[in-house]
Image (cartoon, helix red, strand yellow):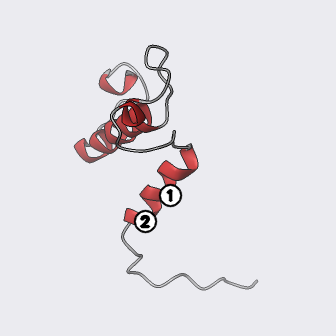
Amino acid sequence: MRRFTRLTNGFSKKIENHSASVALYMMYYNFGRKHKTLGTTPAVAAGITDHIWSVEEIIGLLEKSEPKATRPARAASSN
């Protein structure tokens, strides 16, 4: 992964960003990507899930785990 290389713009400067990127990659690799040798995802082959996950399902997990906004929404300014 280019995320581990400092020579690219994709390099993570913060450890939090790096761990989030690796976690997202591993989630897709195990649940969303069909492997040629298995014919399915590793998660389906291991019996963890019964279907190949779509990107929308994975993003839905992220949205559920995000903390709620603590700051009030900004009022739209009228000009």
Q: Which residue is mark 2?
A: 64
Residue 75 spot, x, y in % from top left:
60, 86
Q: Residue furthest top?
A: 37
41 shown above or below 55? above
Q: Find disc 1 in the rendering and name its residue.
A: 60
In the image, taking residue 21 as reference, residue 78 lies left or right, namely right
Q: Quarter holding the C terminus?
A: bottom right
- The residue that appears at 49% across and 30% down in the rendered structure is 33
Q: Residue at x 30, y 24 (%)?
A: 4
Quadrant for the N terminus in the image: top left
Count of numbered badges drawn on the protein: 2
For residue 44, side relative to residue 17 (left or right) = right
In the image, 11: left or right of 75?
A: left
> Under tag 2, what secondary structure?
helix
Q: Nearer the viewer, residue 18 or 46?
A: 46
| 9 and 40: which is toward the camera | 40
Q: Residue at x 39, y 41 (%)?
A: 24
